[in-house]
Every structure is written in C-alpha cells, then in structure tokens.
C-alpha cells in the first residue's frame, strides 16, 4: 500500500516514487546499508513500465528527450554507485546526503511554483489535446509541439544535466528521474505534462543499468561486511504496489494541475529533507 500510494502521486510529475520509498526503508524498516540503493532501483524496474505504457498509449512520450536523458544518466550511474559504496556506507552520513539531495529538489520545486505566468501555474483542465506532435532531434536542440506551442531544449545542455543527475541518482538509488523532472520544468521551461513519460522511461533504463552495475561490483566487496546486492524480495514487493500506482498516476495526470502536482511533491520532499538533515546533527 505504501508503494501504491506514493507512486500514484509522484508518477504524475514523472517521478517513480523511489525518492520517497528510500526514506521509508531507512526510517521505518531500518534498511540503511548500501544495498538499499539497488533495492530501490529494483523497485523502479518493476513498477515504472506500467506508467510508461500509459504515457505511450496516450501519445505523451517525447522520444528525443527520452533518449538524450538516458544517454547521459546511464554512465553517470556507474560513478554514482562507486561514490555510494566508498563515501556513504554508514546510515548517518548517507541520511545527510539524502537530505541534501531532497532539499535541493524541494527548493527547485518551490522556486518553480513562485514564478508567475509559467506553465506550472496553469489551472487543471479536463479537456484539451495532451498528445505530443512533431518531436524532432538535433545535435544542437530538440523540439516538439504541445497544445499548439512549440518547445525547444538544448541537446548538449540536456546531456550534461543528465550526466550529473546520473551521478547523484546512482548514489541515492532513485534512477535520476526524480531529480531531472524538476530541472526540465524549471531550467528548460518544458511543460510538466510533457516530461512525465520521458522522466519515467529514463528512470526505468537507468535503474536497470544501476542494478546491473551494483551486481557486477558486489563480488569485489565480498570480503567486507557491506551488503551490496539488492534485497530482491523487498524490491519486488514494493514494485508490485508501484505497478498499479504508476498506471493510475499516469492515467490521472492530465486531469490534475501542474501547480497541484508540484505543490504536493515539494511538501513531501522538503519534509523528509529537513528531518534527515536535523537527525545528522543530533
């Protein structure tokens, strides 16, 4: 039920829910070792496809944007996994890292909500054409048409951002979608209703790569007390709830205002960030 509730909400904004499920594992289940990161990625692998399917079915997937993000996030994940194991093996330090990441995400979300006149301030509508048309890839920029408006984004800028997101996402165990979705809205001015599918698809591919990376490097830590491999049962259990939650969230997204989606996400993310940062200093 936890995974279902979280993913139903977060998938509307292109976030798999792993960003909130990881704190649940750390705080309520006492699962805070390095293995919690690949376990979280395993949840993404199982849960995300249902949301991606719904976005594809409704014609709301921007494929050029999706592939650029994947190309940048995937190599970043490898270095992120190394950072997680080498520098944040203990629970206290890792909580501070998680809190810092969530705080930054939350601030970006709040900043986007305070900017008047942007797309995320629009009211919810039950009608309108939410399908994406004319998506084109270029080495300088990508473009696509949404609600009779042409949107553009720098290809090198997207790739560079995705690379950095992969580094953080690999260490945190969220696949990167939770971090990159707010950036796409705030930095590249892309409508929130068009980035959900791309963010979730990149989360799935990068999470798959992340689990493989953790599995490959785990033998090198077999002589230590660190558990590196994912908890397959726990990851599958969370993933089962996420399957239904993400499908529902993707289905309902176009009926919910971008402002409301971002407001709820900001409150959730910032509350956890403050909690973890304060715990480090007590």
Image (cartoon, rainbow, N blue to C red):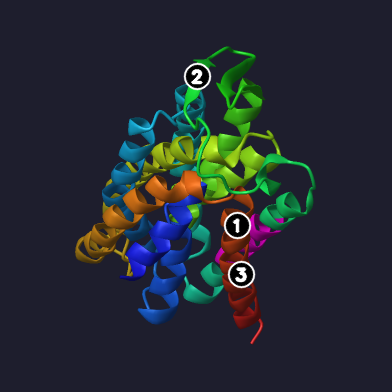
On the image, the x and y values in percent for residue 35 come to 34, 63
In this orientation, which residue lies closer to the viewer: 23 or 224?
Answer: 23
In this orientation, which residue lies closer to the viewer: 126 or 1?
Answer: 126
Q: Going from the N terminus, do you reach mark 2 or mark 3 first?
A: 2
Eye-nearest disc, 3 or 1: 1
Magenta highlight on residue 101: yes
Pointer 2 residue: 133
Circle 2/circle 1 CB separation < 8 Å: no
**Picture layout, residue 25 above or below residue 144:** below
Distance from label 2 to label 1 (Cα)?
25 Å
The residue under the point 47% across, 50% down is 12
The residue under the point 41% across, 65% down is 21
Q: Which mark is residue 273?
A: 3
In this orientation, which residue lies closer to the viewer: 68 or 192?
Answer: 192
Eye-nearest disc, 2 or 3: 2
Residue 96 in view in this figure: no
On the image, the x and y values in percent for residue 68 come to 51, 26
């Amino acid at each position: 039920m936890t995974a279902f509730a979280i993913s139903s909400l977060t998938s509307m904004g292109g976030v798999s829910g792993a960003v909130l499920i990881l704190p649940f594992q750390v705080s309520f289940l006492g699962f805070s070792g390095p293995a919690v990161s690949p376990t979280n990625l395993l949840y993404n692998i199982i849960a995300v496809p249902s949301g991606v399917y719904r976005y594809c079915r409704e014609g709301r997937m921007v494929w050029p944007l999706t592939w650029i993000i994947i190309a940048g996030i995937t190599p970043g994940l490898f270095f992120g996994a190394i950072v997680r194991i080498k520098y944040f093996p203990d629970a206290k330090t890792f909580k501070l890292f998680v809190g810092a990441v969530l705080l930054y995400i939350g601030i970006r979300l709040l900043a986007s909500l305070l900017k008047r006149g942007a797309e995320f301030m629009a009211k919810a509508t039950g009608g309108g054409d939410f399908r994406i048309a004319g998506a084109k890839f270029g080495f300088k920029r990508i473009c696509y048409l949404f609600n009779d408006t042409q949107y553009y984004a720098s290809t090198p800028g997207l790739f560079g951002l995705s690379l950095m997101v992969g580094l953080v996402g690999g260490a945190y165990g969220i696949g990167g979608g939770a971090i990159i979705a707010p950036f796409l809205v705030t930095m590249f001015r892309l409508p929130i209703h068009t980035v959900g599918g791309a963010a979730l698809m990149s989360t799935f591919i990068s999470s798959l790569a992340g689990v493989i990376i953790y599995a490959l490097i785990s033998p090198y830590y077999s002589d230590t007390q660190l558990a590196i491999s994912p908890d397959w049962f726990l990851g599958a259990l969370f993933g089962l709830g996420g399957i239904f939650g993400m499908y529902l969230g993707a289905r309902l997204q176009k009926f919910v205002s971008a402002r409301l989606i971002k407001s709820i996400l900001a409150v959730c993310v910032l509350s956890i960030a403050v909690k973890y940062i304060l715990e480090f200093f007590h």
